[in-house]
Image (spheres, grey):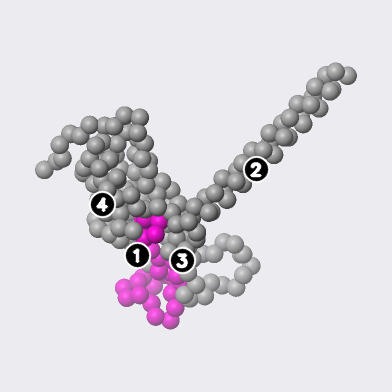
Amino acid sequence: MAPGVSKRIKTLSLTRPIIYGNTAKKFGEVRPPNAPAEHTHLWTIFVRGPQDEDISYLIKKVVFKLHDTYPNATRTVEAPPFELTETGWGEFEINVKIHFVDEANEKMVSFYHHLRLHPYHNVKAEPQAPNDEISSIYYDELVFNEPNEELFKILVSRPGNLLPSNKTDKCIFSKQLEQEEIDRIKIGISKVDNEIEELKAKIAKQLEN
């Protein structure tokens, strides 16, 4: 049965942080069973809480659209952990759709993640060894503008999913990292403002002459 209509709370905006991305490892001597002969890597794509919290109170299911060469390319995960493990040989764009619990009455969120299998930082390095894990992980926030009363109750009752103060093994993102990024942005803006003022002064001096 569909949930009843719940009033929207005007002027209110709530957020919940998530991390998403993929990890990948090159096959070793033992290949996963049923892996096609041309496949070289085992990879996992996921949507999680910042510290691997259970987010099923908010997310009903996650749909991953893989490359069309995969059988049943559209995969739906309806219970935590919201992740999918497969094998492959090439990188491609994966469409990720997050569907929220019925009570939220919110539209699903759709985005793309580029599946990463290989290290990019040093193309002259030795070939990737088995068990060398590659990670491509991003931080984002789900924003709910004018949530309904039911969603408000859900989010208030579960105030978790917060960034840790410092980097941990479970979460490479942290409040400290966020503040450092904000500080870098502020410094960059200040430098640009100073350059603008210097340029204005030079132009004004040229006009005077």
How many numbered marks appear?
Answer: 4
Query: Which numbered disc, 3 or 4, marks the residue that appears first in the sequence?
Result: 4
Read off the residue under disc 1. 85
Residue designated by label 4: 57
Three-letter amino acid code at the position of disc 4: Tyr
Among all residues in the image, which is located at the extreme top? 208
Q: Residues within 10 Å of mark 2 (few under 14, many from 20)?
A: few
Closest to the camera, between mark 3 and mark 1, is 3
Most common SS among magenta residues: loop
How far is mark 4 from mark 1, CA to CA? 23 Å
- Residue that appears at 40% across and 56% down: 50
Amino acid type, mark 2: Ile
Residue 11 x, y percent position in the rendering: 35, 30
Which span of residues is magenta-colored?
24-52
First of labels 4, 2 by sequence position: 4
Which of 175/32 is in front?
A: 175
Q: Is residue 119 magenta?
A: no
Q: Is residue 33 magenta?
A: yes
Query: Helix, strand or loop at disc 1?
Result: strand
Percent of width and height locating residue 156: 29, 45
Residue 115 visible within the image: no
Q: Amino acid at mark 3?
A: Asp
Name the residue that disc number 2 marks: 187
Residue sitting at 50 percent across and 72 percent down? 132
Residue located 31% across and 29% down the image: 10
